Image: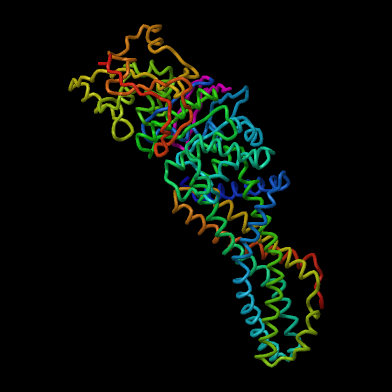
Amino acid sequence: MGVEVQIDGLTKSFGRQNIWADVSFTLPEGEISVLLGPSGTGKSVFLKTLVGLLRPDRGHIWIEGKDLPELSERDLYEVRKLFGVLFQDGALFGSMNLYDNVAFPLREHTRKSESAVRDIVMEKLDLVGLAGDEKKLPGEISGGMRKRAGLARALVLEPEIILFDEPDSGLDPVRTTLLNHLIVDLNQQTGATFLIVTHDINTARTVPDNIGLIYRRHLAMFGPREMLLSSEEPVVRQFLNAQRHGPIGMAEEKDASELEAEAAAGIELPMLPPIPLQMQPTDGRPRAAERIPGEWCRTNGVIPPVGSFAPAPGQPTTVPAQGGVSEWAGPDRVDPHADTVVIERRDGGA
Amino acid sequence: MSNPVAGALRQSGSFFAYCLDCLLAIPRRPFQLREMIQQAWFVSSVSILPTALVAIPFGAVISLQLGTLTSQLGAQSYTGAASVLAVVREAGPIVTALLIAGAGGSAICADLGARKIREELDAMEVLGIDPVQRLVVPRIIACMIVALLLNGLVSVVGVAGGYFFNVVLQGGTPGAYLASFQALGQIQDLIAGEFKAVVFGAMAALIACYKGMTAKGGPKGVGDAVNQSVVISFMLLFAVNFVMTSIYFQIVPQKGT
């Protein structure tokens, strides 16, 4: 039922090049967190450090009272069983078909009979919409399918912490949305702790409970979604709203003279866009860490941007009927009998 | 980073540490028998034919060289003895190791390198499985077994090749060739040859696995890793061979001295 991960003063360098320094935050148990950052800020390195594939120079990662960087190789393999990781390209074993790929962790770690393995594998493949493709080799399927198969393999040992390395890169918008829904559903069903590394703004705005931003070799901010989405902090503001003006330039960061010139020119920053509602699980039940929209803003005296927490105009809100389906049918296998009602709501919104 | 001496030392150090890791992983359960058999089958399937084809001319060349020399000295009856000695002691293990490293090692290195850059090895570690125990140990043991068996093949084929050239082409006496086998050679030569082959097989596999698992920088990195693994194995092979031969002469008394 989810595990809390405490990260304290984590620092990593390659040779003389510092990647990030003094990163401290806590992944709350059972919640979805997103880690953002401009390209090349070491987000993937961070993920690999978190699962112990890379050792940090300094700092601690506390999981169930154990400090990951201090563990021996053998203890590390034990702690890793808590993790499920979806790598960027799925990282499937090229010599095995999808079925064997997903069955691999079960065969290695459990003494389950082949028929029990089969049941679990087919269930997970069905969950990610790959039922019927189990005999295919990773080389024969598309990037999106590889990603989904990688997710099925990551889920097979029922991990407590699930890490996603750019789940939305190289996927079309429809599949990105479906994958994001799957993440929210999984979080609700399993109660596991999720960390998503991405630079897709749409995902970052609607999926998580918490957002973190890595910038200039340190963690610029980490906190509840509403805190970052309503933040006036220049970096956070620029990144989360995909704006041109701000401290982030085409090269990793703009130099001081450029920033001064920008300030002198008196460029007025556009208004903050409204904070969207969180993505809801498809079965209509609340999220694992459901909070009332706008609660954080109210308790902290922050006035959210105009039009926040209302369904965006024109965007359909899915209101599930009773006993709604939680299973994810791929876009090519839409269930014609899906008992989900789609209602267009046009009230409210800016 | 810029200092080449420091770089070489760091490489050697990390390779040594890797070898120790592998050694510690060998007794760890469960042993991957299936993977080992598959790898042994694969390595032998790519190296048996080339090894045999290299062994025939190798034995023949030794016979040709010795045949002329021994006939000038009037010691034709010792041609067989000398060629057995050369093939069993030196040529066998070296030819075996060159082909294990060249055919099997390069394939192993390319395979592991490709898995490394596709993050398959990372994924495996995250799934709680040690790639050294799951992939590397079976490969090392497979290479050792195949080297042991191939060395026998090379010895037989090499001696047969020598016999053919000596008897058929140089007009040597078949009986003298066979009878002189035991004049210089002894059973320790065969044991030492097999021992060398096993060590060389392990070395080739270790270098191939190490280079494959440390490959980086995309497909080109894998190519570089394969290239380096073959070159390094060949160089180390001859150096280690020299050392082992020297030790052998120190500890095993030779016939006829």
Foreground residue, A30 or A174? A174
The secondary structure that most of the magenta stretch takes on is strand
User: On the rendered structure, is A269 left or right of A103?
Assistant: left
Quadrant in the picture for residue B140: bottom right
Count of marks overlaid on the render: 0
Residue placed at 56% from the left, 44% from the top? A99
User: In this picture, which residue range is highlighted in magenta?
Assistant: A1-28
Counting from the top left corner in percent of width and height, residue A85 is at: 52, 35
Quadrant in the picture for residue A247: top left
Residue placed at 75% from the left, 81% from the top? B81
Q: Is residue B175 visible?
A: yes
Counting from the top left corner in percent of width and height, residue A106 is at: 63, 39
Foreground residue, A277 or B44? A277
Q: How is the image coloured?
A: rainbow
User: On the rendered structure, is A110 left or right of B183?
Assistant: left
User: On the rendered structure, is B25 left or right of B212?
Assistant: right
Counting from the top left corner in percent of width and height, residue A256 is at: 28, 26
Counting from the top left corner in percent of width and height, residue A68 is at: 59, 29
A197 up-or-down from B230: above or below:
above
Is residue A6 magenta-colored? Answer: yes
Image quarter hosting the C terminus of chain B: bottom right
Q: Is residue A210 visible?
A: no
